[in-house]
């Protein structure tokens, strides 16, 4: 994934199935998504109010 923001973010799974580590300004990174189907909640470690979900189908 690519961050289009001006500050560092992460995609950190709520129960630690994955994390991207820090993603800087316009940086592209990859991570290993879970193989099991489901909805995985994640948040930004830097801004913990930022939450989203990853859906594996
Ligand atoms: Cu953030």
Image (cartoon, helix red, strand yellow):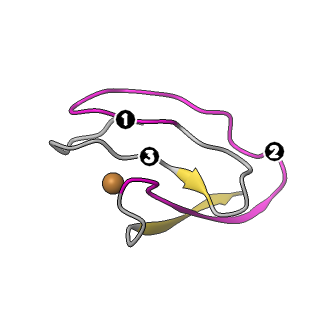
Residue neighbourhood size for the residue with mark 1, other residues' Cα within 10 Å, grouped as few (<14), some (14–19), many (≥20): many
Q: Are marks 2 and 3 in contact (CB under 8 Å)?
A: no
Compared with 47, 23 (above or below) is above
The image's mark for residue 2 is: none
| Residue 52 part of the magenta-drawn span | no
Q: What's the residue at 34%, 35% (across, down)? A: 2
Between the C-alphas of marks 2 and 3, the distance is 20 Å
* Image-quadrant location for residue 39: bottom right
Residue that label 2 marks: 35
Compared with 51, 32 (above or below) is above
Q: What's the residue at 60%, 42% (across, down)? A: 19
Point out residue 48 in the picture as x, y percentages from the top left corner. 42, 66
Quadrant containing the C terminus is bottom right
Point out residue 12 in the picture as x, y percentages from the top left corner. 56, 52
Q: Is mark 3 within 8 Å of ligand 1?
A: yes
Residue that label 1 marks: 23
Q: Helix or strand or loop: what does disc 1 sit on?
A: loop
> In the rendered view, does 34 fall on the left or right side of 42?
right
**Segment tinted magenta in the rendering:** 21-46
Q: Nearer the viewer, residue 36 or 57?
A: 36
Ligand number 1: quarter of image: bottom left
Q: Are marks 3 and 1 in contact (CB under 8 Å)?
A: yes
Q: Helix or strand or loop: what does disc 3 sit on?
A: loop
Whichever of labels 3 and 1 marks the residue nearer the N terminus, that label is 3
* Image-quadrant location for residue 44: bottom left
* Image-quadrant location for residue 18: top right
Whichever of labels 2 and 3 marks the residue nearer the N terminus, that label is 3
The chief SS type of the magenta part is loop
């Amino acid at each position: 994934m690519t961050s289009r923001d001006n500050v560092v973010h992460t995609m950190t799974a709520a129960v630690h199935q994955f994390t991207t580590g820090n993603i800087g300004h316009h940086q592209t990174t990859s991570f290993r998504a879970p193989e099991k189907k489901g909805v995985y909640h994640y948040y930004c470690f830097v801004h913990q109010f930022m939450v989203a979900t990853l859906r594996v189908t």
